Amino acid sequence: PIRFGSTPSRRRSLAHQLVELPNRKFGAEGLKCGERGFLRTDTLEDWFKEFGRPIAIETDVKRYAGALLQGSKDLTGDRKVMRMTQSPARRRIDRKAAEAREILAEMQRKEKEQQSRKPRPSLV
């Protein structure tokens, strides 16, 4: 029932934005969305008569519909994990670990430099 069109503004900063516009060619003229007769097919049976049955097997359709049309999930476990990983104590530990890794990398780099400066014994 809608189309996306460009923003009526001539501002260049808004050129990427789209606006929803009513599609006057969609649906029966004089009827509102949801009224009987607005669409060419009002029921699934009418749809199947006009466009044919889907290629998918009925059990596949039911299985995927069940996966897509689930109710809201319980997010308490996800929220607990998020609280643990984003707590101030955890962030402080992560920050100190990152600092320790930087110090260790710097010490290893200096050690390599000192070893490369030492004269190597000749094999004669």
Image (cartoon, helix red, strand yellow):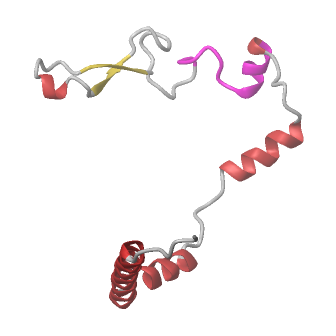
Question: Above or below — where is 60 with respect to 30?
Answer: below
Measured as percent of width and height from the top left, residue 3 is found at 39, 19
Stretch in magenta: 37-49
Residue at the extreme left = 11
Report the quarter where the N terminus lies. Answer: top left
| Foreground of the two, 83 or 29 | 83
| Foreground of the two, 115 or 83 | 115
Question: Above or below — where is 118 with respect to 4?
Answer: below
Question: Above or below — where is 22 with respect to 68?
Answer: above
The residue at the point 67 percent across, 49 percent down is: 68
| Horizontal arrangement in the rendering, residue 117 relative to residue 17 (left or right) | right
Residue at the extreme bottom = 89
The residue at the point 60 percent across, 67 percent down is: 73
Measured as percent of width and height from the top left, residue 117 is found at 36, 73
> What is the number of callouts on the image?
0
Report the quarter where the C terminus lies. Answer: bottom right
| Foreground of the two, 80 or 116 | 116
| Horizontal arrangement in the rendering, residue 74 relative to residue 56 (left or right) | left
Q: In the figure, residue 100 lies in which quadrant?
A: bottom left
Measured as percent of width and height from the top left, residue 42 is found at 64, 23
Question: Above or below — where is 111 with respect to 55?
Answer: below
Measured as percent of width and height from the top left, residue 72 is found at 58, 63
The residue at the point 75 percent across, 14 percent down is: 51
The residue at the point 83 percent across, 22 percent down is: 53
Magenta segment includes 43 = yes
Q: In the figure, residue 93 lies in which quadrant?
A: bottom left
Magenta segment includes 18 = no
